[in-house]
Amino acid sequence: MKKQTLVTVSESVLNGMERKVERLKTLMEMSAILSSTLDHDELISLVMEKAKSDLDAEACSLLFYDKETNRLEFKGATCEDEKTSESLQRKGTLEIGQGIAGAVAETLQPLFLEDVSADSRFYQEADRFAGFPIKSLIALPLVGRSGLIGVAEILNPGRKDYDPEIVQLLARQFAIAIENSLFYKESVEGERLRQELDIASSLQKSFLPEASTFRKGELWVSAVNISAEKVGGDLYDFIEQGEDRVGILIGDVSGKGISAALYMARFSSDFRSVAHLADSPSVALKRLNLSLLKSPRGMFLTCIYLLVDMATGGVHLSVAGHPPFLWITKGQVKVMSPQGGPPLGIIPAEYPVTTISLGKGDRLLLLTDGVFDAKDKAGQRLGFENLVRFIGTRQKEKELIKVITEYIEDFSKGAERADDVTIVELGWG
């Protein structure tokens, strides 16, 4: 049997080995915590509880850096007393350079203070905010791949034999974990928003006519609606009023996006109930206007509503702050700017009626301002006059709406769409 050899090591070497084992154990425990969750709030809570426990601290707090305001904002805290935790979280903000945390954020260097009263940078209001005397603290910068994330503070640590290098290493790991959790949170929220926008877009489209074309007797109508974003504020509608009249509407809500879409949805619902009971476009717009006056300030809607007499081709229309429409008749493109009232939803108003008579082969083009406000990649606006000239050269096209839409798409190729685009074309005969 081989004789075993005993090796004697000094106490200092043994202590060093024990410290390394302790370091490894601490790192493994913290790594397990950091990899246990991607939930931002849960991660912060777990790490602060661990730091407080391991360092036998009275409290821990976390300040996040706001790049827009260039200030530190208290975002999390943990201590034995729940009221103190709430107080620490309500402390508000600190300027960069203000107090210990502000100094750490400015220099990106940690501070280990055994006696805070001896440091002139100590924020004297901190005791009152914390609810207990702060005698000592550890303040650590949290720096991720994108720069400063915030500052972590450990208040009144009872354990004095901690290893500053390990504490700093854990702070760096914590910073990266926070950054990852923020990326994950933004990704999840972004995906949820995309799903909600998809649903909102589908719901909004449901307020438009099921088919974008309509025909009855000598009248035919066609429409196109293209949103600048997932959801928008442009709308159109066709509505039969018995056998002898058809109502046609085009509208444009102020702004775009979700708020405009919600406003548009409400208006669409109101329009269908009002239009069936109103015997003239003037009455319909007046009632709709009174309804929309109760809406949030700053929201309004421009529109044209017309009623076509199926027996004669006569058109009665009223305008609420909407751009001119075009009348293609006898080889000419006429710009029609009838007297109207203000946009709906601003002030009580009257909406005069204008009457025109359509002849065989005549067309009307109703537009929202997104059609002629389209911009090219150099930022140049298409303009109403250019649009009218183009339509004049292509007025005999059978699918005129398609031609106009392609013209706008070609003009604005490479540029972000500035506004919703809606066109309604109606013809007689």
Image (cartoon, grey):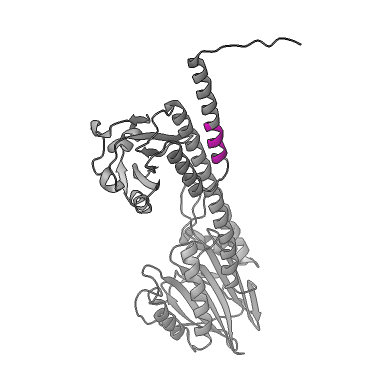
Is residue 97 visible to us here?
A: no
Q: Is residue 426 above or below residue 227?
A: below
In depth, the one of 267 and 424 nearer the eye is 267
Residue with the most extreme right position: 1
Would residue 349 appear left or right of 391 to someone viewing this image?
left
Number of marks present in the image shown = 0
For the point 40% across and 33% down, which residue is it?
Answer: 159
Query: x, y percentage for residue 236?
Result: 54, 72
The answer to if 330 sits in the magenta stretch is: no
In depth, the one of 320 and 311 nearer the eye is 320
Magenta stretch, main secondary structure, is: helix
Query: x, y percentage for residue 358?
Result: 56, 80
Region of the chain picked out in magenta, as a range:
26-33
Query: x, y percentage for residue 94?
Result: 30, 43
Q: In this view, does 257 lie above or below 43?
A: below
In depth, the one of 414 and 109 nearer the eye is 109
Q: In this view, does 336 lie above or below 352?
A: above
For the point 53% across and 36% down, which residue is it?
Answer: 30
- Choose top left, top right, bottom left or bottom right for residue 409: bottom right
| Quadrant showing the N terminus | top right
Would residue 110 appear left or right of 331 to someone viewing this image?
left
Would residue 148 appear left or right of 361 to someone viewing this image?
left
Is residue 43 visible to us here?
A: yes
Would residue 60 appear left or right of 403 to someone viewing this image?
left
For the point 53% across and 41% down, which residue is it?
Answer: 180
| Quadrant showing the C terminus | bottom right
In depth, the one of 17 and 230 nearer the eye is 17
Query: x, y percentage for residue 339?
Result: 39, 77
The answer to if 29 sits in the magenta stretch is: yes
For the point 43% across and 73% down, which residue is it?
Answer: 337
